[in-house]
């Protein structure tokens, strides 16, 4: 437990040191989307029976919680390649579970901050959504899933260039094709089947359903929990290999 707290507090101290810049970065992209799509389309465009902004904001929540939680991989790589902090973790009596758990929780914390920023930015647009327990449960599971994936992949890459490739070929396409900006039903059937394999697709659907007051999408929630558990186990394996 002490090792887990140490890893998490280290990441939080770094976050605290650059909190203003981080919050500004978390706000820029969602604000641009809200302004561009909010004023361009607003309530004049109806999707699934609701205004486009009501459809968009839950998608932005899903996308930002994914990108911000996955962003912990960059911090891990900086610590590995430049500060050699991971070598100190190797020498310290910190278990793999404690290390992975601390980094994953740090990624989840960043994601929850980003979600809070989006919900605050949405207030001036007058969008009324429901942010109940199921909404937050899904956001937490989505953050856990991609933070775990981030730790797993961060142990495999050999340079920042490799990390950039992962972001470009995995995270960015998922951000735009995971049901964040448009309903998947408008795509060809074959594309829908392919995109159903993406965790973000189920996260977007479950978060949007909860935010719009629909019945909980337990299938999507359970799938996220299962994928997150697999990624967490994968992170434990890659950390063990990196230590060996």
Image: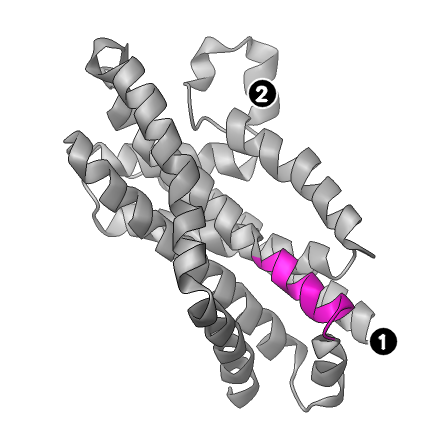
Point out residue 223 in the picture as x, y percentages from the top left corner: 49, 43
Q: Is residue 3 magenta?
A: no
Residue sitting nearer the eye, 215 or 52: 52
* The magenta stretch spans residue 73: yes
- Counting from the top left corner in percent of width and height, residue 150 is at 62, 55
Which quadrant: the C terminus?
bottom right
Residue at point 22% right, 9% down? 44
Query: Which residue: 74% across, 41% down?
Result: 165
Q: Position of residue 114 (x, y in %)?
A: 38, 50
Viewer can see residue 171: yes
Which residue is label 1 attached to?
A: 244
Boundaries of the magenta span: 72-83
Position above or below: 164 against 106: above
Q: Nearer the viewer, mark 2 or mark 1?
A: 1
Q: Main secondary structure of the magenta part?
A: helix
Please report the residue visible at 52 percent of the width from the left and 72 percent of the height from the top. 11
Residue 159 disc label: none
Element under disc 2 = helix
Residue at 54% x, 18% y is: 192
Which class describes the residues within 10 Å of circle 2: few (<14), some (14-19), or many (20+)?
A: few
What is the quadrant of residue 157 in the picture? bottom right
Which of the two residues, 178 or 40, is positioned nearer the viewer here? 40
Give the CA distance from mark 2 to mark 1. 39 Å
Any mark on residue 193, and which? 2
């Amino acid at each position: 437990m002490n090792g887990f707290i140490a890893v998490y507090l280290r990441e939080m101290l770094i976050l605290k040191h650059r909190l203003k810049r981080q919050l500004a970065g978390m706000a820029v992209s969602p604000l641009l989307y809200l302004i561009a799509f909010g004023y361009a389309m607003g309530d004049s465009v109806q999707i699934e029976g609701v205004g486009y902004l009501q459809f968009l904001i839950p998608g932005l929540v899903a996308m930002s919680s994914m990108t911000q939680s996955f962003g912990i991989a960059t911090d891990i790589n900086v610590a590995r390649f430049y500060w050699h902090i991971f070598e100190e973790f190797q020498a310290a009596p910190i278990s793999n579970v404690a290390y992975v758990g601390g980094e994953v929780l740090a990624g989840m914390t960043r994601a929850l901050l980003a979600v809070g920023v989006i919900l605050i930015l949405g207030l001036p647009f007058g969008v009324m959504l429901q942010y109940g327990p199921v909404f937050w449960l899904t956001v937490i599971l989505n953050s856990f899933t991609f933070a775990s994936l981030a730790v797993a992949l961060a142990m495999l890459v050999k340079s920042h260039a490799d990390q950039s490739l992962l972001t470009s070929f995995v995270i960015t396409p998922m951000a735009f094709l995971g049901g964040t900006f448009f309903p998947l039903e408008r795509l060809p059937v074959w594309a829908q089947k392919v995109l159903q394999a993406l965790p973000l697709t189920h996260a977007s659907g479950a978060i949007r359903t909860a935010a719009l007051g629909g019945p909980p999408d337990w299938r999507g929630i359970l799938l996220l929990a299962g994928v997150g558990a697999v990624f967490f186990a994968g992170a434990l394996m890659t950390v063990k290999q990196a230590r060996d």
